Amino acid sequence: MNSRTPAPLARPVLLASLLAGGLTLTATQAQAATITIACGDGGAADFCPVLAEQWAEQTGHEVAVVTTPQSATEKLSLYQQLLGSQSGDIDVLMIDTVWPGLLAPHLVDLAEHLPEDATEGFFPAMIDNNTVDDRLLALPWFTDAGLLYYRRDLLEQYGHEVPETWEQLTEIAREIQNAEREAGNERMHGFVFQGRAYEGLTTNALEWIASYGGGTLVDAEGNVTVNNPRAAEALTLAATWIGDIAPRGVRNYMEEEARGVFQSGNAVFMRNWPYVWALGEAEGTAIQGRFGAAPLPHGPEGESVATLGGWSYAVSRYSEHPAEAADLVAYMTGEAQQKAHAIRFGMNPTREALYQDAEVLEAQPFIGELYDTLVGGVPRPANVTGEHYPRVSNAFFNRVHDVLSGDLTAEQGLEQLERELGRMSRRGW
């Protein structure tokens, strides 16, 4: 791929189009190089702008922060627009754990700009995930795995343990929801999750299917395996939740919508990522001290499975300052910064030593308790499907959404999905 730097006039034009698409930009005082970093959505759990400005203060460089959409699907689309035009407008990108292979042609080999020991201390599997064709494309910032949040006080009140199977969750959620509504809380729901047609639904549905023993979308050899009876059983149960234990509006929920319902005290169970813990325990919330987190339930004969998530930092191949951008990446993912991120926001570090750090565990005890869940989750089939992964995920979450909406049965949805993925794979992943 041509790695030329775009003409200067291309920068304001493309950046203006990105800003029109929902991005916002802020900057500090300028000294030396100007490094632009694409962070998260600027919400309560977005620590990226704070750390980026700390780096600027320490180095004397200028940093500009671009906030991006909450939806990973929308964020990827914007990145592809940016990188596809070979623009140098953004130097550092916050990327999903499934994107290194997809974005590889557009990313710098960080090993060319960082010391040889730059990867020491990280979980080796995470470094392996971010290494494509022997090129280190990103350093991992935090890792995620899906968790089951539950109202501890309500389970105790109604005499229930934390459910181990999805069927148990369904029954308990229905019982407590209905009892609470009869007691006066008509807004109570049994279970909320990420049901919108986007990448978040892919992570949820993979957990349902894999925990039923239904495997993943595509196996390690690239074979499409998703159309099987256990996968159908899992999706059939999930479809029954809509309008029963889950609000019909859950089909448009992302992470923050689900958190809003649970944190307001109006859900018994919630599937979400680890960041929710710290926000739920904040002073004055309706659920402070009244909830817990546990591994996700499983099917009748399966095992608890959590989809792996997480974010890393990478440097655009079209950056005019790759060395300075790589230095910012190293700073953002440094041990001290990850420790602060864990203590303040409950984000799970990608540096192994922090899982034994006394200050981290005192502030966020569940990080240590759920260590095995967080590092042993199921990956999405991004490495197998490569550049096709966005289309694979898009087909999957759309068919699952059709099932949740009642437009297709689970069997029909999986048959359609099998045909779609089969057409994609004919020419090879």
Image: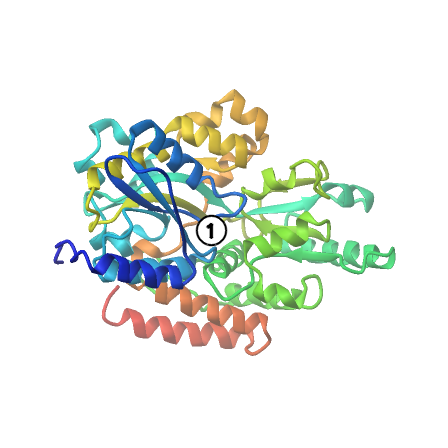
Image position of 274 (left or right of 168): left
Give 392 or 94, whichever is nearer the viewer. 94
Q: Disc 1 designates what residue?
A: 41
Q: Residue at x 54, y 44 (%)?
A: 44
Give 269 or 426, whichever is nearer the viewer. 269
Image position of 379 (left or right of 30): right
The quadrant holding residue 121 is top left
Task: Tell me the quarter of the image containing the N terminus.
Answer: bottom left
**Where does the image place residue 214, in percent across and percent down from the top left?**
48, 60
Q: Residue at x 47, y 34 (%)?
A: 341
Q: Is residue 335 above or below residue 151?
A: above
Task: Tell me the quarter of the image containing the C terminus.
Answer: bottom left
**Where does the image place residue 5, in percent across and percent down from the top left?**
15, 53
The kind of residue on which mark 1 rests is Asp
The answer to whether residue 301 is visible is: no
The answer to whether residue 191 is visible is: yes
